[in-house]
Amino acid sequence: MDGEIEFNVVMPFVNLKSVGGKFDDESFCAGFEMGILDLRLFQAKAMGCDKLTMNIRTDNSPQADLIAMKHGMWIEHKAVDSSGYWMTCVFVQSSQTVEL
């Protein structure tokens, strides 16, 4: 389609409804993305990094805020791309860690 960005699947998810599975495609992918964020923030903290930049779906922003708090971080900067679908977030160390 003219003017649309096309993405190819890097790793197929075989349990999505679109391929005969039982899980909703968008919800599953959003959860997978937040799982990756959780892991990357855990690793950043364990390695003593004070900043992490990651692209996420704009709709995941509220959840990303909570995951960041869990790891004693907050989102210092958000930049939404021209499609409005993706955003770049810069996570930085906070002075507080929230128990969830």
Image: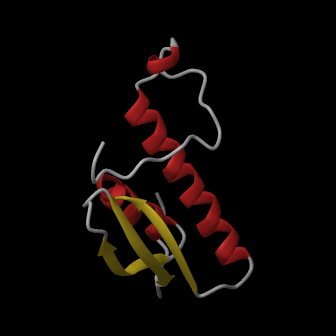
Residue name at image x 29 percent, y 53 percent:
59
Q: Is residue 42 above or below residue 48?
A: above
Horizontal side, residue 86 vs residue 35: left or right: left
Number of callouts: 0
Residue plotted at (51% across, 70% down): 54
Residue visible at 47% across and 85% down in the picture: 94
Residue at the image point whose x is 70% and y is 85% from the top: 48
Residue found at the very far front of the displayed protein: 2
Q: Quadrant of the N terminus?
A: top left
Could you say where residue 57 lies in the image, as x and y percent from the top left? 37, 56
Q: Is residue 76 above or below residue 54?
A: below
Q: For this rendering, which residue is in front, 41 or 70?
A: 41
| Residue located farthest toward the right when viewing the structure as drawn | 47
Colour scheme in use: secondary structure
Q: Position of residue 40 (x, y in %)?
A: 63, 65
Pinpoint residue 35: horizontal percent, then vertical percent. Answer: 56, 50
Between 64 and 7, the one nearer to me in the picture: 7
Q: Relative to 77, is 33 on the left or the right?
A: right
User: Residue 37 location in percent, x, y?
Assistant: 54, 60
Residue farthest top in this picture: 20
Would you say 23 lies left or right of 10 here? left
